[in-house]
């Protein structure tokens, strides 16, 4: 079964997904081994792979290590065109729909299109929405876009709805890596109530309680990067919350 079909199936059966974001620049072979082991034991659903910069050329090594040690699919979550790799299972082809930078809406996609078309990657078009989070995150700066204000649920709803009508397959609301404040629960709920697409939430989620809050507000998939880099044991607690939220929904 392809990745997107599995995401749709999980959504319709109420099964929540938990994703570990691997920023290749932040991991050593040792820290990667710990995170992969805990992820396998806890049943992490996916790895996303990507970062804002490209300081190391270790993407292929990381992907093949994960493939060797786990059956968990690796999905590219690229910060730029240089982070494309044919070895992963899929790619979130992000269009930054909260911004008004044409390069991030369509320009880089044009440049990458021949590579992607020739690749074996499953391409999952994703409406990517940056939400203001208290300070300028790396992605705000690197994408040269202004995030949606955290208090403007209506703008978030209209943006996600437009993304859905344009044919995106997923909506990803991101406060940005290392955000001080995650996406507000009220905004998650408002967007969830307005679209039928699977909804991904990430950025600034540092505790199991925040994971639970995102699921309860309507996230189908929660992504955690920074907090797990600092404390890999969070994987166990966060996936336990995912399992409990799944049970709650099913019962
Ligand atoms: C960033 O949503 C991801 O794009 C994850 O963010 O690193 O803050 O968990 P964190």
Image (cartoon, rainbow, N blue to C red):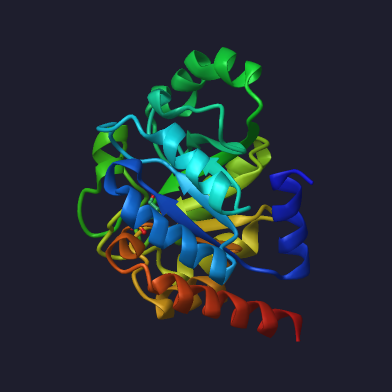
Check the image and name the residue furthest to the left: 135
Q: Is residue 54 above or below residue 23?
A: above
User: Closest to the observer: 208 or 181?
Assistant: 208
Q: As drawn, is 241 to the left or to the right of 102? A: right
Q: Is residue 200 above or below residue 122?
A: below
Q: How many marks?
A: 0
User: Closest to the observer: 67 or 246?
Assistant: 67
Q: As drawn, is 47 to the left or to the right of 195? A: left
Residue 232 at x, y percent in the picture:
36, 67
Q: Is residue 47 above or below residue 64?
A: below
Viewer can see residue 210: yes
Res 44 → quadrant: bottom right
Q: As drawn, is 3 to the left or to the right of 219? A: right
Viewer can see residue 224: no
Q: Quadrant of the C terminus?
A: bottom right
- Rendered residue at 32%/65% (across/down): 227
- Rendered residue at 27%/64% (across/down): 230
User: Closest to the observer: 243 or 185?
Assistant: 243
Residue 152 at x, y percent in the picture:
40, 58
Residue 239 at x, y percent in the picture:
53, 73
User: Closest to the observer: 251 or 2?
Assistant: 2
In terms of image quarters, where does ligand 1 lie?
bottom left
Residue 77 at x, y percent in the picture:
47, 40
Res 56 → quadrant: top left
């Amino acid at each position: 079964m392809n990745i997107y079909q599995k995401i749709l199936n999980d959504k319709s059966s109420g099964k929540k997904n938990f994703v570990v974001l691997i920023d290749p620049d932040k991991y050593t072979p040792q820290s990667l081994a710990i995170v992969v082991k805990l992820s396998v034991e806890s049943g992490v659903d996916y790895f996303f792979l990507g970062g804002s910069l490209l300081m190391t050329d270790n993407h292929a090594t990381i992907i093949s290590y994960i493939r060797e040690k786990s059956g968990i699919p690796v999905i590219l979550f690229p910060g730029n065109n240089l982070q494309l790799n044919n070895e992963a299972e899929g790619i979130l082809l992000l269009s930054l729909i909260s911004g008004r930078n044409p390069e991030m809406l369509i320009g880089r996609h044009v440049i990458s299109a021949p590579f992607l078309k020739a690749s074996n990657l499953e391409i999952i078009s994703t409406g990517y929405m940056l939400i203001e989070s208290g300070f300028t995150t790396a992605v705000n700066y690197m994408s040269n876009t202004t995030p949606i204000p955290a208090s403007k649920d209506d703008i978030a709803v209209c943006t996600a709805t437009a993304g859905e009508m344009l044919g995106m397959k997923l909506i990803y609301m991101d406060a940005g890596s290392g955000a001080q404040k995650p996406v507000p629960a009220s905004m998650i709920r408002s967007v969830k109530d307005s679209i039928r697409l699977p909804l991904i939430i990430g950025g600034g989620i540092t505790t199991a309680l925040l994971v639970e809050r995102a699921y309860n507000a309507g996230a189908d998939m929660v992504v955690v990067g920074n907090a797990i880099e600092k404390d890999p044991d969070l994987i166990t607690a966060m996936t336990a919350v995912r399992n409990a939220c799944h049970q709650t929904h099913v019962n």
